[in-house]
Each structure stands twice: as structure tokens, then as C-alpha cells.
Image (cartoon, helix red, strand yellow):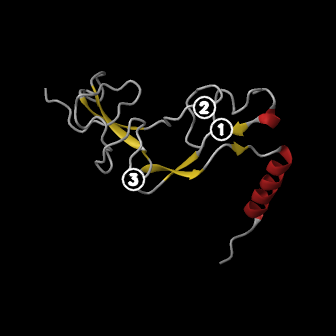
């Protein structure tokens, strides 16, 4: 069996060799990633990583598997992993998660870029829309959907 050579930072459950020189290499542009997984060449976090999968029977293993990366940043309130929009699914960015008025997006927002990296677009924390703001946005969306396209 050959040794894996295009491994990047190991996702959860991956079986990669950290002594492999490609372990912390961006699968998209070959740049060396920092310890958090940030790619300095792509100016963001790679959206996909490769890892060497050794288990299972269908499809045949061992083989390279391409998986989407998870946000490596932790919530400053509860330390759970944030999503790429900067939201925390455990505490909703609040010390009192039962109170909807206190919800926030505690982290920075990252959007997928055409280079294949998650790029920082908004610095957090960000407030969640109030009921009145959400109703106004929803009304605008309903009006746009009701419009007929001009030909």
C-alpha cells in the first residue's frame, strides 16, 4: 500500500499522518496552512480538504476523500464550534439563550469565495434582527416575489 501524499489538515475522523509534509498543506493552492488551518495564499480557510480514508467497503477503501471543512473558531461564550456565518448553535451567542432578544452571531462571518476558500466578510459580533426588523425584511421579500419579471 502506498503512503498518502496529498493530505491536508485532518478533519474530524480522518486518518492522516501528521509527519507527512503535506499534512498542513492547502489542497487548493499548495500553500502551507497555519496551525488553525488558515491559508495565507488564498486569504481564507480552505473550503475542502483531502484525507486518507481507510474504513468501509463501498466505495472501495483505502482512498482519498474530499470533505468540506468546519469552521475552526470557537464561540467566545460557550466554546462550541461556530458555523461559517459566525453563529453558535449551542448558545446562540447569548449568556441567556432562552431570551431571543439577546441572541447574536458572536463570531466573524466567512463567505465562500470562487477561489475555494472561506473568506472573512464581516467582523463579529453581529446582532440578530429584532422581530420588527425581520418583519420588514420579510415584507420586502414578499413584495419582490409578487413582482412579475419584465420582458
Residue under numbered circle 2: 75
Q: Is residue 26 above or below residue 55?
A: below
User: Horizontal and vertical percent for residue 104?
Assistant: 71, 39
Quadrant of the drawing holding the N terminus? top left
Residues at marks 2 and 1, CA–CA distance in whole angstroms: 7 Å
Number of residues whose C-alpha sits closer than 10 Å to that of mark 2, classed few (under 14), some (14–19) or many (20 or more): many
Residue beneath the point at 43% across and 44% down:
47
User: Horizontal and vertical percent for residue 15?
Assistant: 30, 25
Q: Which mark is residue 151?
A: none
Q: Tell me whether circle 2 and circle 1 mark residues in contact (CB < 8 Å).
A: yes
User: Horizontal and vertical percent for residue 139?
Assistant: 81, 56
Asked which quadrant contains residue 96, the reply is top right
Residue under numbered circle 3: 42
Number of residues whose C-alpha sits closer than 10 Å to that of mark 3, classed few (under 14), some (14–19) or many (20 or more): some
User: Horizontal and vertical percent for residue 105?
Assistant: 67, 40
Mark closest to the chain's N terminus, 2 or 3: 3
Residues at marks 2 and 3, CA–CA distance in whole angstroms: 24 Å
Mark closest to the chain's N terminus, 3 or 1: 3
Which element type, helix, strand or loop, lies under badge 2?
loop
39 with respect to 52 (left or right): right
Quadrant of the drawing holding the C terminus? bottom right
Tally of numbered tags: 3
Residue under numbered circle 1: 106
Residue beneath the point at 34% across and 26% down:
14
Mark closest to the chain's N terminus, 2 or 1: 2
Amino acid at each position: 500500500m502506498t503512503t498518502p501524499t496529498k493530505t491536508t489538515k485532518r478533519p474530524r475522523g480522518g486518518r492522516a499522518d501528521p509527519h507527512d509534509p503535506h499534512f498542513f498543506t492547502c489542497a487548493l493552492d499548495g500553500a502551507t496552512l497555519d496551525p488553525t488551518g488558515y491559508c495565507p495564499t488564498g486569504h481564507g480557510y480552505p473550503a475542502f480538504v483531502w484525507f486518507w480514508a481507510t474504513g468501509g467497503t463501498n466505495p472501495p477503501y483505502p482512498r482519498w476523500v474530499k470533505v468540506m471543512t468546519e469552521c475552526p473558531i470557537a464561540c467566545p461564550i460557550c466554546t462550541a464550534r461556530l458555523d461559517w456565518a459566525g453563529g453558535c448553535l449551542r448558545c446562540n451567542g447569548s449568556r441567556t439563550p432562552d431570551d431571543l432578544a439577546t441572541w447574536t452571531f458572536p463570531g466573524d462571518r466567512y463567505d465562500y469565495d470562487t477561489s475555494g476558500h472561506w473568506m472573512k466578510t464581516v467582523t463579529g459580533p453581529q446582532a440578530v434582527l429584532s422581530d420588527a426588523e425581520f418583519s420588514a425584511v420579510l415584507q420586502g421579500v414578499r413584495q419582490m416575489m409578487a413582482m412579475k419579471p419584465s420582458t
